[in-house]
Amino acid sequence: MPDTDTEKPVFPRWARYLLLPGMLGPLLVLGFIFVDELAHDEGRCPYVRGETRALGHEVYVREDRRVCLGDVEDHRYSVIRAGQERLLARRRFRAEAFAAGRYEWQAQLSDQNEVHLHVKNLGHADADYREGTEAERRADEPRKRLAERK
């Protein structure tokens, strides 16, 4: 019968110290992601309605904003057609990226009646978004209704 006092551990002490960061690192990263996303939850930190720009007959683009975590500012852009709202884009950067003179956005209606959005933040890559043609929007509706039911 082996004596438990003289048995050697599975890993030597120095190996345990090397394994510790490898085990704790992913837990810390997952914890950070959880806290960050929890802070940006719509129920805890709602958007404040911002500027609305008219593009055509019953077609608008509205910019909403919120600051939920330190100096991180979150902007979203929604297309409103005949009273129905659809999310077009979101951008989340430090508040200084949205400061006056460092930030601008432009929206226009194309010949195919789709909204094109151009967002410019100094220090970050410009972003171009498009709503999709009428046929693309119709094809997207069943998938969107299914996602809303869940």
Image (cartoon, rainbow, N blue to C red):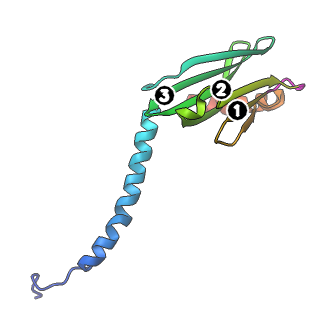
Residue 43 sits in which quadrant?
top left
What label sits on residue 67 in the rendered view? 3
Relative depth, front residue between 50 and 103:
103
Residue at the location (69% across, 28% down)? Answer: 104
Residue 108 sits in which quadrant?
top right
Residue at the location (27% across, 77% down)? Answer: 14
Cα distance between the residues tagged 3 and 1: 19 Å
Cα distance between the residues tagged 3 and 2: 15 Å
What label sits on residue 29 in the rendered view? none
The magenta-colored residue range is: 111-115
Left or right: 18, with 100 as reference point: left
Q: Are marks 1 and 2 in contact (CB under 8 Å)?
A: yes
Q: Is residue 150 visible?
A: no
Q: Are marks 3 and 2 in contact (CB under 8 Å)?
A: no
User: Nearer the N terminus, badge 3 or badge 1?
Assistant: 3
Image quadrant in which the C terminus is located: top right
Which is the main secondary structure of the residues drawn in magenta? loop
Which residue is disc 1 drawn over?
Answer: 119
